[in-house]
Image (spheres, rainbow, N blue to C red):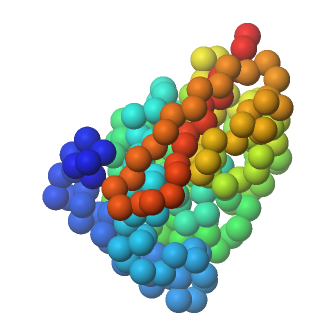
Amino acid sequence: MAAMNLTATEKQKERLLAFIRLLRKWNRVYNLTSIRHPVDMVRLHLLDSLSILPYLKGNRVLDVGTGAGLPGLPLALFSPDKEFTLLDSDAKKIRFVRQATIEMCLTNINAEHIRIERFRPQEGFDSILVRAFASLNEIAVETVRLLNPGGVILAQKGKIPQDEINLLENSLVEVFPIEIQGLGAERHLVAIKVRN
């Protein structure tokens, strides 16, 4: 975290570790993630999630296809002033997210068991997060209706998906390299803003 210029209180560190313990416990029965080793979970789940913290915009954040609450839960812990909605179509994953929300003492999380296509919130979002959800074009098609004016879609990818970027229409796209200590794989954040 220090290498990423992130500071954490002891309480935040304790809650992140409680999340990892809970994830390992539930993983034995529900297979929430293929990552099993705690050190790998820290790198590939926690640090990967927190790497996009500086790119969040506004107060309302939607995490589409959150799975085991990633990246939404770690980001919500470090952004208590923001309201997070974590969305997944898998009921067992949303049950886990709700339990993790309680154990991490988070009050800024709303977990929704619904497919993105059927999701009709009363208010839009300033940041929409997607991680391994679909191609960038599919992501934009499914989520752009949920963006507030000036909002951004933040898609976590490995290598720069130039072919996918080329297919985006009516969008301003920025790509940011993401460095995670101890992770040899490429990581990029693709920020998509819709032109007015």
- Tally the numbered discs: 0
Q: Residue at x 82, y 48 (%)?
A: 118
* Vertical order, 187 against 60 (above or below): below
Which residue appears farthest toward the top when viewing the image?
196
Q: Nearer the viewer, residue 54 or 113?
A: 54
Residue 105 visible, this orientation: yes
Whether residue 83 is visible to the viewer of this picture, yes or no, is no
Measured from the top left, where is residue 89 in percent x and y?
73, 62
Q: Is residue 68 left or right of residue 42?
A: right
Image vertical order of residue 58 relative to residue 109, above or below: above
Q: Is residue 187 left or right of residue 172?
A: left
Figure quadrant of residue 33: bottom right
User: Where is residue 9 drawn, in percent x and y?
Assistant: 18, 52
Q: Residue at x 30, y 69 (%)?
A: 17
Residue 127: percent from left, percent from top: 56, 33
Position of residue 163 in the picture relative to residue 36 (left or right): right
**Which residue is farthest front?**
184
Q: Residue at x 52, y 49 (%)?
A: 187
Against 124, is 4 above or below? below
